Image (tube, grey):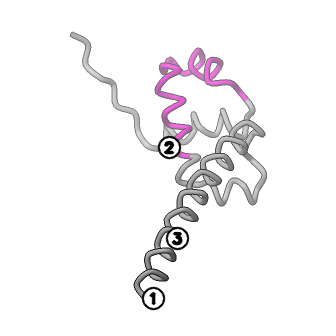
């Protein structure tokens, strides 16, 4: 059985920078660094989730990534809105 290879945080950040700021695909970075495409995509996904506000301000997200992020935020806001509507309905019933 193969053991899992561990990568330093600096290495991961450099790989993410190649994809986000360098404009390279995960496949291209994978071929040059010898890291699996799946790992690179997971690192990028975690990085974008943690740094979405900063990246949005700097304009470093691709249109596809921005669209995914906005759709996720929209879904969360819709869910929050539904919860608030239900809570308001419960409060109005209690006051009567």
Question: Is residue 22 toward the left or the right of residue 7 in the image?
Answer: right
84, 16: nearer the viewer: 84
* Magenta: main secondary structure: helix
Provide the residue span drawn in magenta.
24-47
54, 68: nearer the viewer: 68
- The location of residue 39, given as percent across then percent down, is 46, 27
Q: Residues within 10 Å of mark 3 (few under 14, many from 20)?
A: few
Compared to residue 78, the image places residue 95 above or below, namely below
Compared to residue 27, the image places residue 50 above or below, namely below
Q: Which circle marks residue 26 in the picture?
A: none
Q: Disc 3 vs disc 2: which is toward the camera? A: 3
Upstream in sequence: badge 3 or badge 1: 3
Q: Which circle marks residue 84 in the picture?
A: 3
Q: Residue at x 68, y 50 (%)?
A: 70
Q: Residues within 10 Å of mark 1 (few under 14, many from 20)?
A: few
Q: Residue at x 68, y 24 (%)?
A: 25
Q: Residue at x 53, y 53 (%)?
A: 50
Quarter of the image where the C terminus is located? bottom left
């Amino acid at each position: 059985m193969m053991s899992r290879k561990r990568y330093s945080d600096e290495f991961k950040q450099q790989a993410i920078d190649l994809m986000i700021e360098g404009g390279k695909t995960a496949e291209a970075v994978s071929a040059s660094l010898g890291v699996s495409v799946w790992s690179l995509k997971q690192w990028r996904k975690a990085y974008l989730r943690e740094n979405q506000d900063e990246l949005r301000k700097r304009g470093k997200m691709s249109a596809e990534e921005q669209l995914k992020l906005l759709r996720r935020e929209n879904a969360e806001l819709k869910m929050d809105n539904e919860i608030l509507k239900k809570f308001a309905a419960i409060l109005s019933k209690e006051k009567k």
